[in-house]
Amino acid sequence: MKGELIPELKRNIEEIKRRTGGSSDVLINEFVAGGVHCALICCEGMVSTSVITELIFEPITSIPQKKSSHELFHYISEELLLSTDRPEVTDYESLFRLLYSGFAVLTAEGIGFALGFGVQGYASRGIQEPSGEGNVMGAHEGFAETIRTSMSQIRRRLKSPELVMELTQKGEKSRTDLCLCYMKDRVPKELLRRIRSSLDGIKLEAILTTGYIRPFVESSRFELFSSTGTTERPDVLCSKLIEGRVGILVDGVPFAVVIPRLFCESFQTLDDYAYKPYYATFIRWIKYLAFLLAVLLPAVYTAIVMHHPELLNSTLLMILVESERQAPLSIITEAVGVLLMYEVIREAGIRLPKPMGGAVSIVSGLIIGDAAVKSGLISTPLLTVTALAVMSGLCVPELNPPVTILRFAFLAAGGALGLFGISLLACAVLVNICATEDYGFPYTAPLSPFIRSGMGDTAIRSSIEKMQERGFTVEEYHE
Amino acid sequence: MNKLTGKQLGAMLLISDAFALFCFRGAMSLGTLAGLCAGIILQFLLTLPLIYGCGRMGNAVKIFFSLFYILWGGMLFNMQWETSREIHIPYEDSGGTAGKLLISGLIALVCMYISSSGIKAAGRASLIAAAAGGLCLLLAAVSAVRDADWENLKRAGSGRTISAEIIRGLSMSGALGGMAVLLPITKGSRLRNVTGYLSAKLILTAAVVLVSVLVTGGIMEITEYPAVRAAQLSQPFPVQRIDPLFMIVFTVYAVFSVGIQAAMSGYIIGGIFPSAEKYAGAVSLVLMTGAALLLSGVSGYSSITAAAVAAAVFAVPVISCAWKAVRERCLNGYRQ
C-alpha cells in the first residue's frame, strides 16, 4: 500500500485509479491553477461540495500565474490558507487515509507530494438522547457516531488543559479512529501505560463496535461480569475521567469504553447526584435489592416450593399448593418455560422495527400471558415471581446479560438441589466476581478489599461536599 | 504478588473456625466456653514467632505446610460428611450414599474452582461470604435467644477438664496453620492482623458456644452436634422454620474452608513446582479427598491433632528460624 507519490500528474492519477480499482466514489477533478496542471481528489459523500467549491475551487482558480508547481503549492500552503487542517502527504497510504477521512487532496504536475484539506461533510446522526441510560435530572445528550462530535461533547464539559484526547487508528481495513481520553493529572500512569500497550496489541481487520476492542483491554480469564464498562453519556464519561479512569471512543459508535469498571458502579447513575443524599441512598439500595431479586427470585421460589416448604407460613403454603396443583407442568419446567418465553419476546422487541414493538407488547403481555394463566398452563404465583425478577433486572440494565444467564443457572441449581444448590452456585459466582480484575483494580472494590472511605458512594450516597473533600481517584482501589 | 488485607486474612481463617464450630461434636458447657477461650489466648502466644517474622519457608517447611493443609482439608471434608447427616440437604437424604457422594462431589467441584482462582480471589470472596454469613448467624442467634433457657448454663456439662477443652479447642483450630502462608502476604502490621483475627474468633466462639449451651443445654447428653441442634431448635416464628438458612451458611462456610486450604496448598505446591502451578489447586484437592478417606472415622479432637496444629503454628516456624540462624552463623564463620 505504501509507496511514494509519483511526481507526474497523469501517472499519479492512473496509480490512484489502479489502487482504488476504479471505485465510483473517488472523484478526480483535473484543472489548471496558476498555470500548473492540478487534480483535486476527494471521496464522494465524505466531503461537503459547497465547502469545496467556496473554499478551494474559487480561490485556487484565481491564483495568478506561477513559475512552478512548488511555488504554487508554497503559495497555497503558506498564503492562501484554504483550511485549518492542511497536512502534506508524500505516500499513497497517507493519501488514502486522508481521502477516506473526508479530506480533499490536491496534487499537481511535477511535484512528489500532495496537500490535504479538511473539508469533511459526511452525513451523520445528530446528537440525540441516549436510549439505554435514561436520566431524569441530568443532560439529555448522548454520544454521536462521529468521533469528533463525541470529543467535542467531552471537551465542552471539561474545559481543562489536563484533559488529553489522543487519536489513533486501528483496524487493518477499517482504519477506525480511536480516541484515548484521560485527565493527565488524575490517571494512574501505570494504568495508562498498560492500556496503551493493550491497544497496541489490537490486530483486527475492522473495528465496528466497542465489543471489538474490549477483549483486548480486558483480562483473558473467564469473567461473568465485565471489568470494562460502556457509557453513551458524555457527562458520565466526564465524571469517570475526573476519577482518573480512561475512556476510549470509537469512531462510528455512540458509546465510550470506560476502564476500569467496578461492580458497584453499575448501581450508580448521574441522577443519584441530583437528588438529596437520603433519597439517592434509598434508590441505590432498591437497585441492590433489584439485582438480587433479578438473579435469585425464581430460583429461591422454586427451591422453597420444591424442597423447603417449611420456610413458608401455612397460608402462603396453601395458596401456592392450590395454584401449583392446577398447573400441568413441574415448577421448574414452568419457570424455565416462562423465562425462555420472556427472552424470546424481549429479543423480538429489540430486533423488530420500532412501530411493531407495541404489537409485540400486546401479543406477549395480554394474549400469551393472560391466555397461559387462564388456560392453567402456568400458575399465577410463578408468573408473578418471574415478572418481578425480570422487571428487577431492568433496574440495572448494564448487568442484564450476566443476570439473564445467572437467573437460569440459579434456577437449575435451586430446582435440583434447593437452597443448597443455590448456595454452592453462589460461592462459585462470588469467587468469579472477586477474581475479576483488570490492570490491578479489583472489580469488587470497595467492598472487598474493604475501603471504608469508598462506602460514602457505595453503601450510601454522601453529600457532594464530602465527596469533593475526599478527592477520590480510582488509584485508591489499586492493589 | 499483590497482598491480602488484614480483614481478608481474618475472614479466611474465621470461616474455617466457624465451620469447625458448626461441626463441633460432643457436649458443650460453660467449661467448654472457658477452655476454648483460654485456648484462643494460648493460640495467640503460639503465633508470636510467626508475628515476629519466623517461618520463612525453605522447601522442607513448604512441604510440611502443604501436607498440613491437605490433612486439615481432609478433616474438614470429613466434618462436612459427618455433620451433613444432621442437616437436611435435598437429594442427599433420598439418594443414600450415592446422594452423599454427589453432594460431596459438588462441594469438591466448587472448592476446586475456588482453589484455581487463587488466594487473592479466595480472600476477597471470603470477606464477603464471612460478612453475609455473619449476618445470618446474628439473625439465628437473635432468634435463639427467644428459646434460650438460662438454667441450661448450670445444667449442661461436658464432663471434661479445662485443659482437655483447651486441647479440644486447639485441635479444631487447623485454620491457624494458614497464617504461615497468609501472614507474609498480608498488608499491615502482623500483630494487629493476628490480634484482630483472634479477637473476632474469641467473640465468634463465645457466641456460638453460649447460644448452643443456652438452647440445647437441657438435652446436651443426647445432642451430637450442639451448634447444629441449636440452630434447628431456634425458630423465631410459630408456624415457619428457618433452619434452611443455617444450611446456607453451613454450605458456604464448608465450601470456603475446604477451598481455602486447597488454595493455600496449591500456592505452596505451585511455588515449589512452578510448571505445575496451574493444576496445583486441583492436585491438592484430590490429595485432600484421599486424606479424607484415610482419616474417616478418626476423631479430630485428639491431642495428636492439637500437637500438629501447635507444630504448624509454633514449632516449625521456630525450628526453621533457629536452623536459618545457625546456618547463617556457620556460613559467616566459614567466610571469615
Image (cartoon, rainbow, N blue to C red):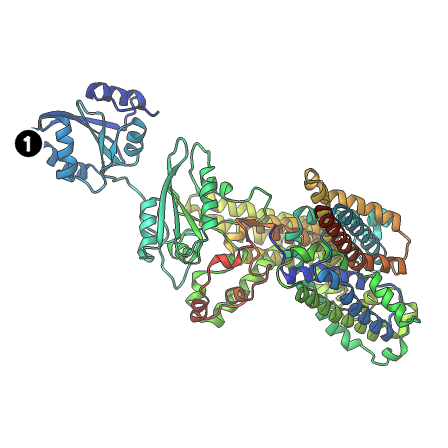
Q: Viewed as shown, does residue A395 lie left or right of A145? A: right
Which corner quadrant of the image does residue B20 belong to? bottom right
Which residue appears at 80% of the width and 52% of the height? Answer: B68
**Residue position for label 1:** A64
Circle 1 chain = A
B78 is higher (above) or lower (below) than B286: below
Residue B137 visible in the snapshot: yes
Residue A444 placed where, x, y %? Answer: 57, 56
| Amino acid at pointer 1 | Pro
Q: Quadrant of residue A251?
A: top left
Give how far across and how far down residue A440 sits, in percent.
54, 51
- Split into 4 quadrants, where in the image is the N terminus of chain A? top left
Left/right of residue A178 with respect to residue B232 in the rendered view = left
Which is nearer the eye, B59 or A172? Answer: B59
Image location of residue B42, percent across then percent down: 80, 68
Local crowd at mark 1 within 10 Å, few (<14), some, or many (≥20)?
few
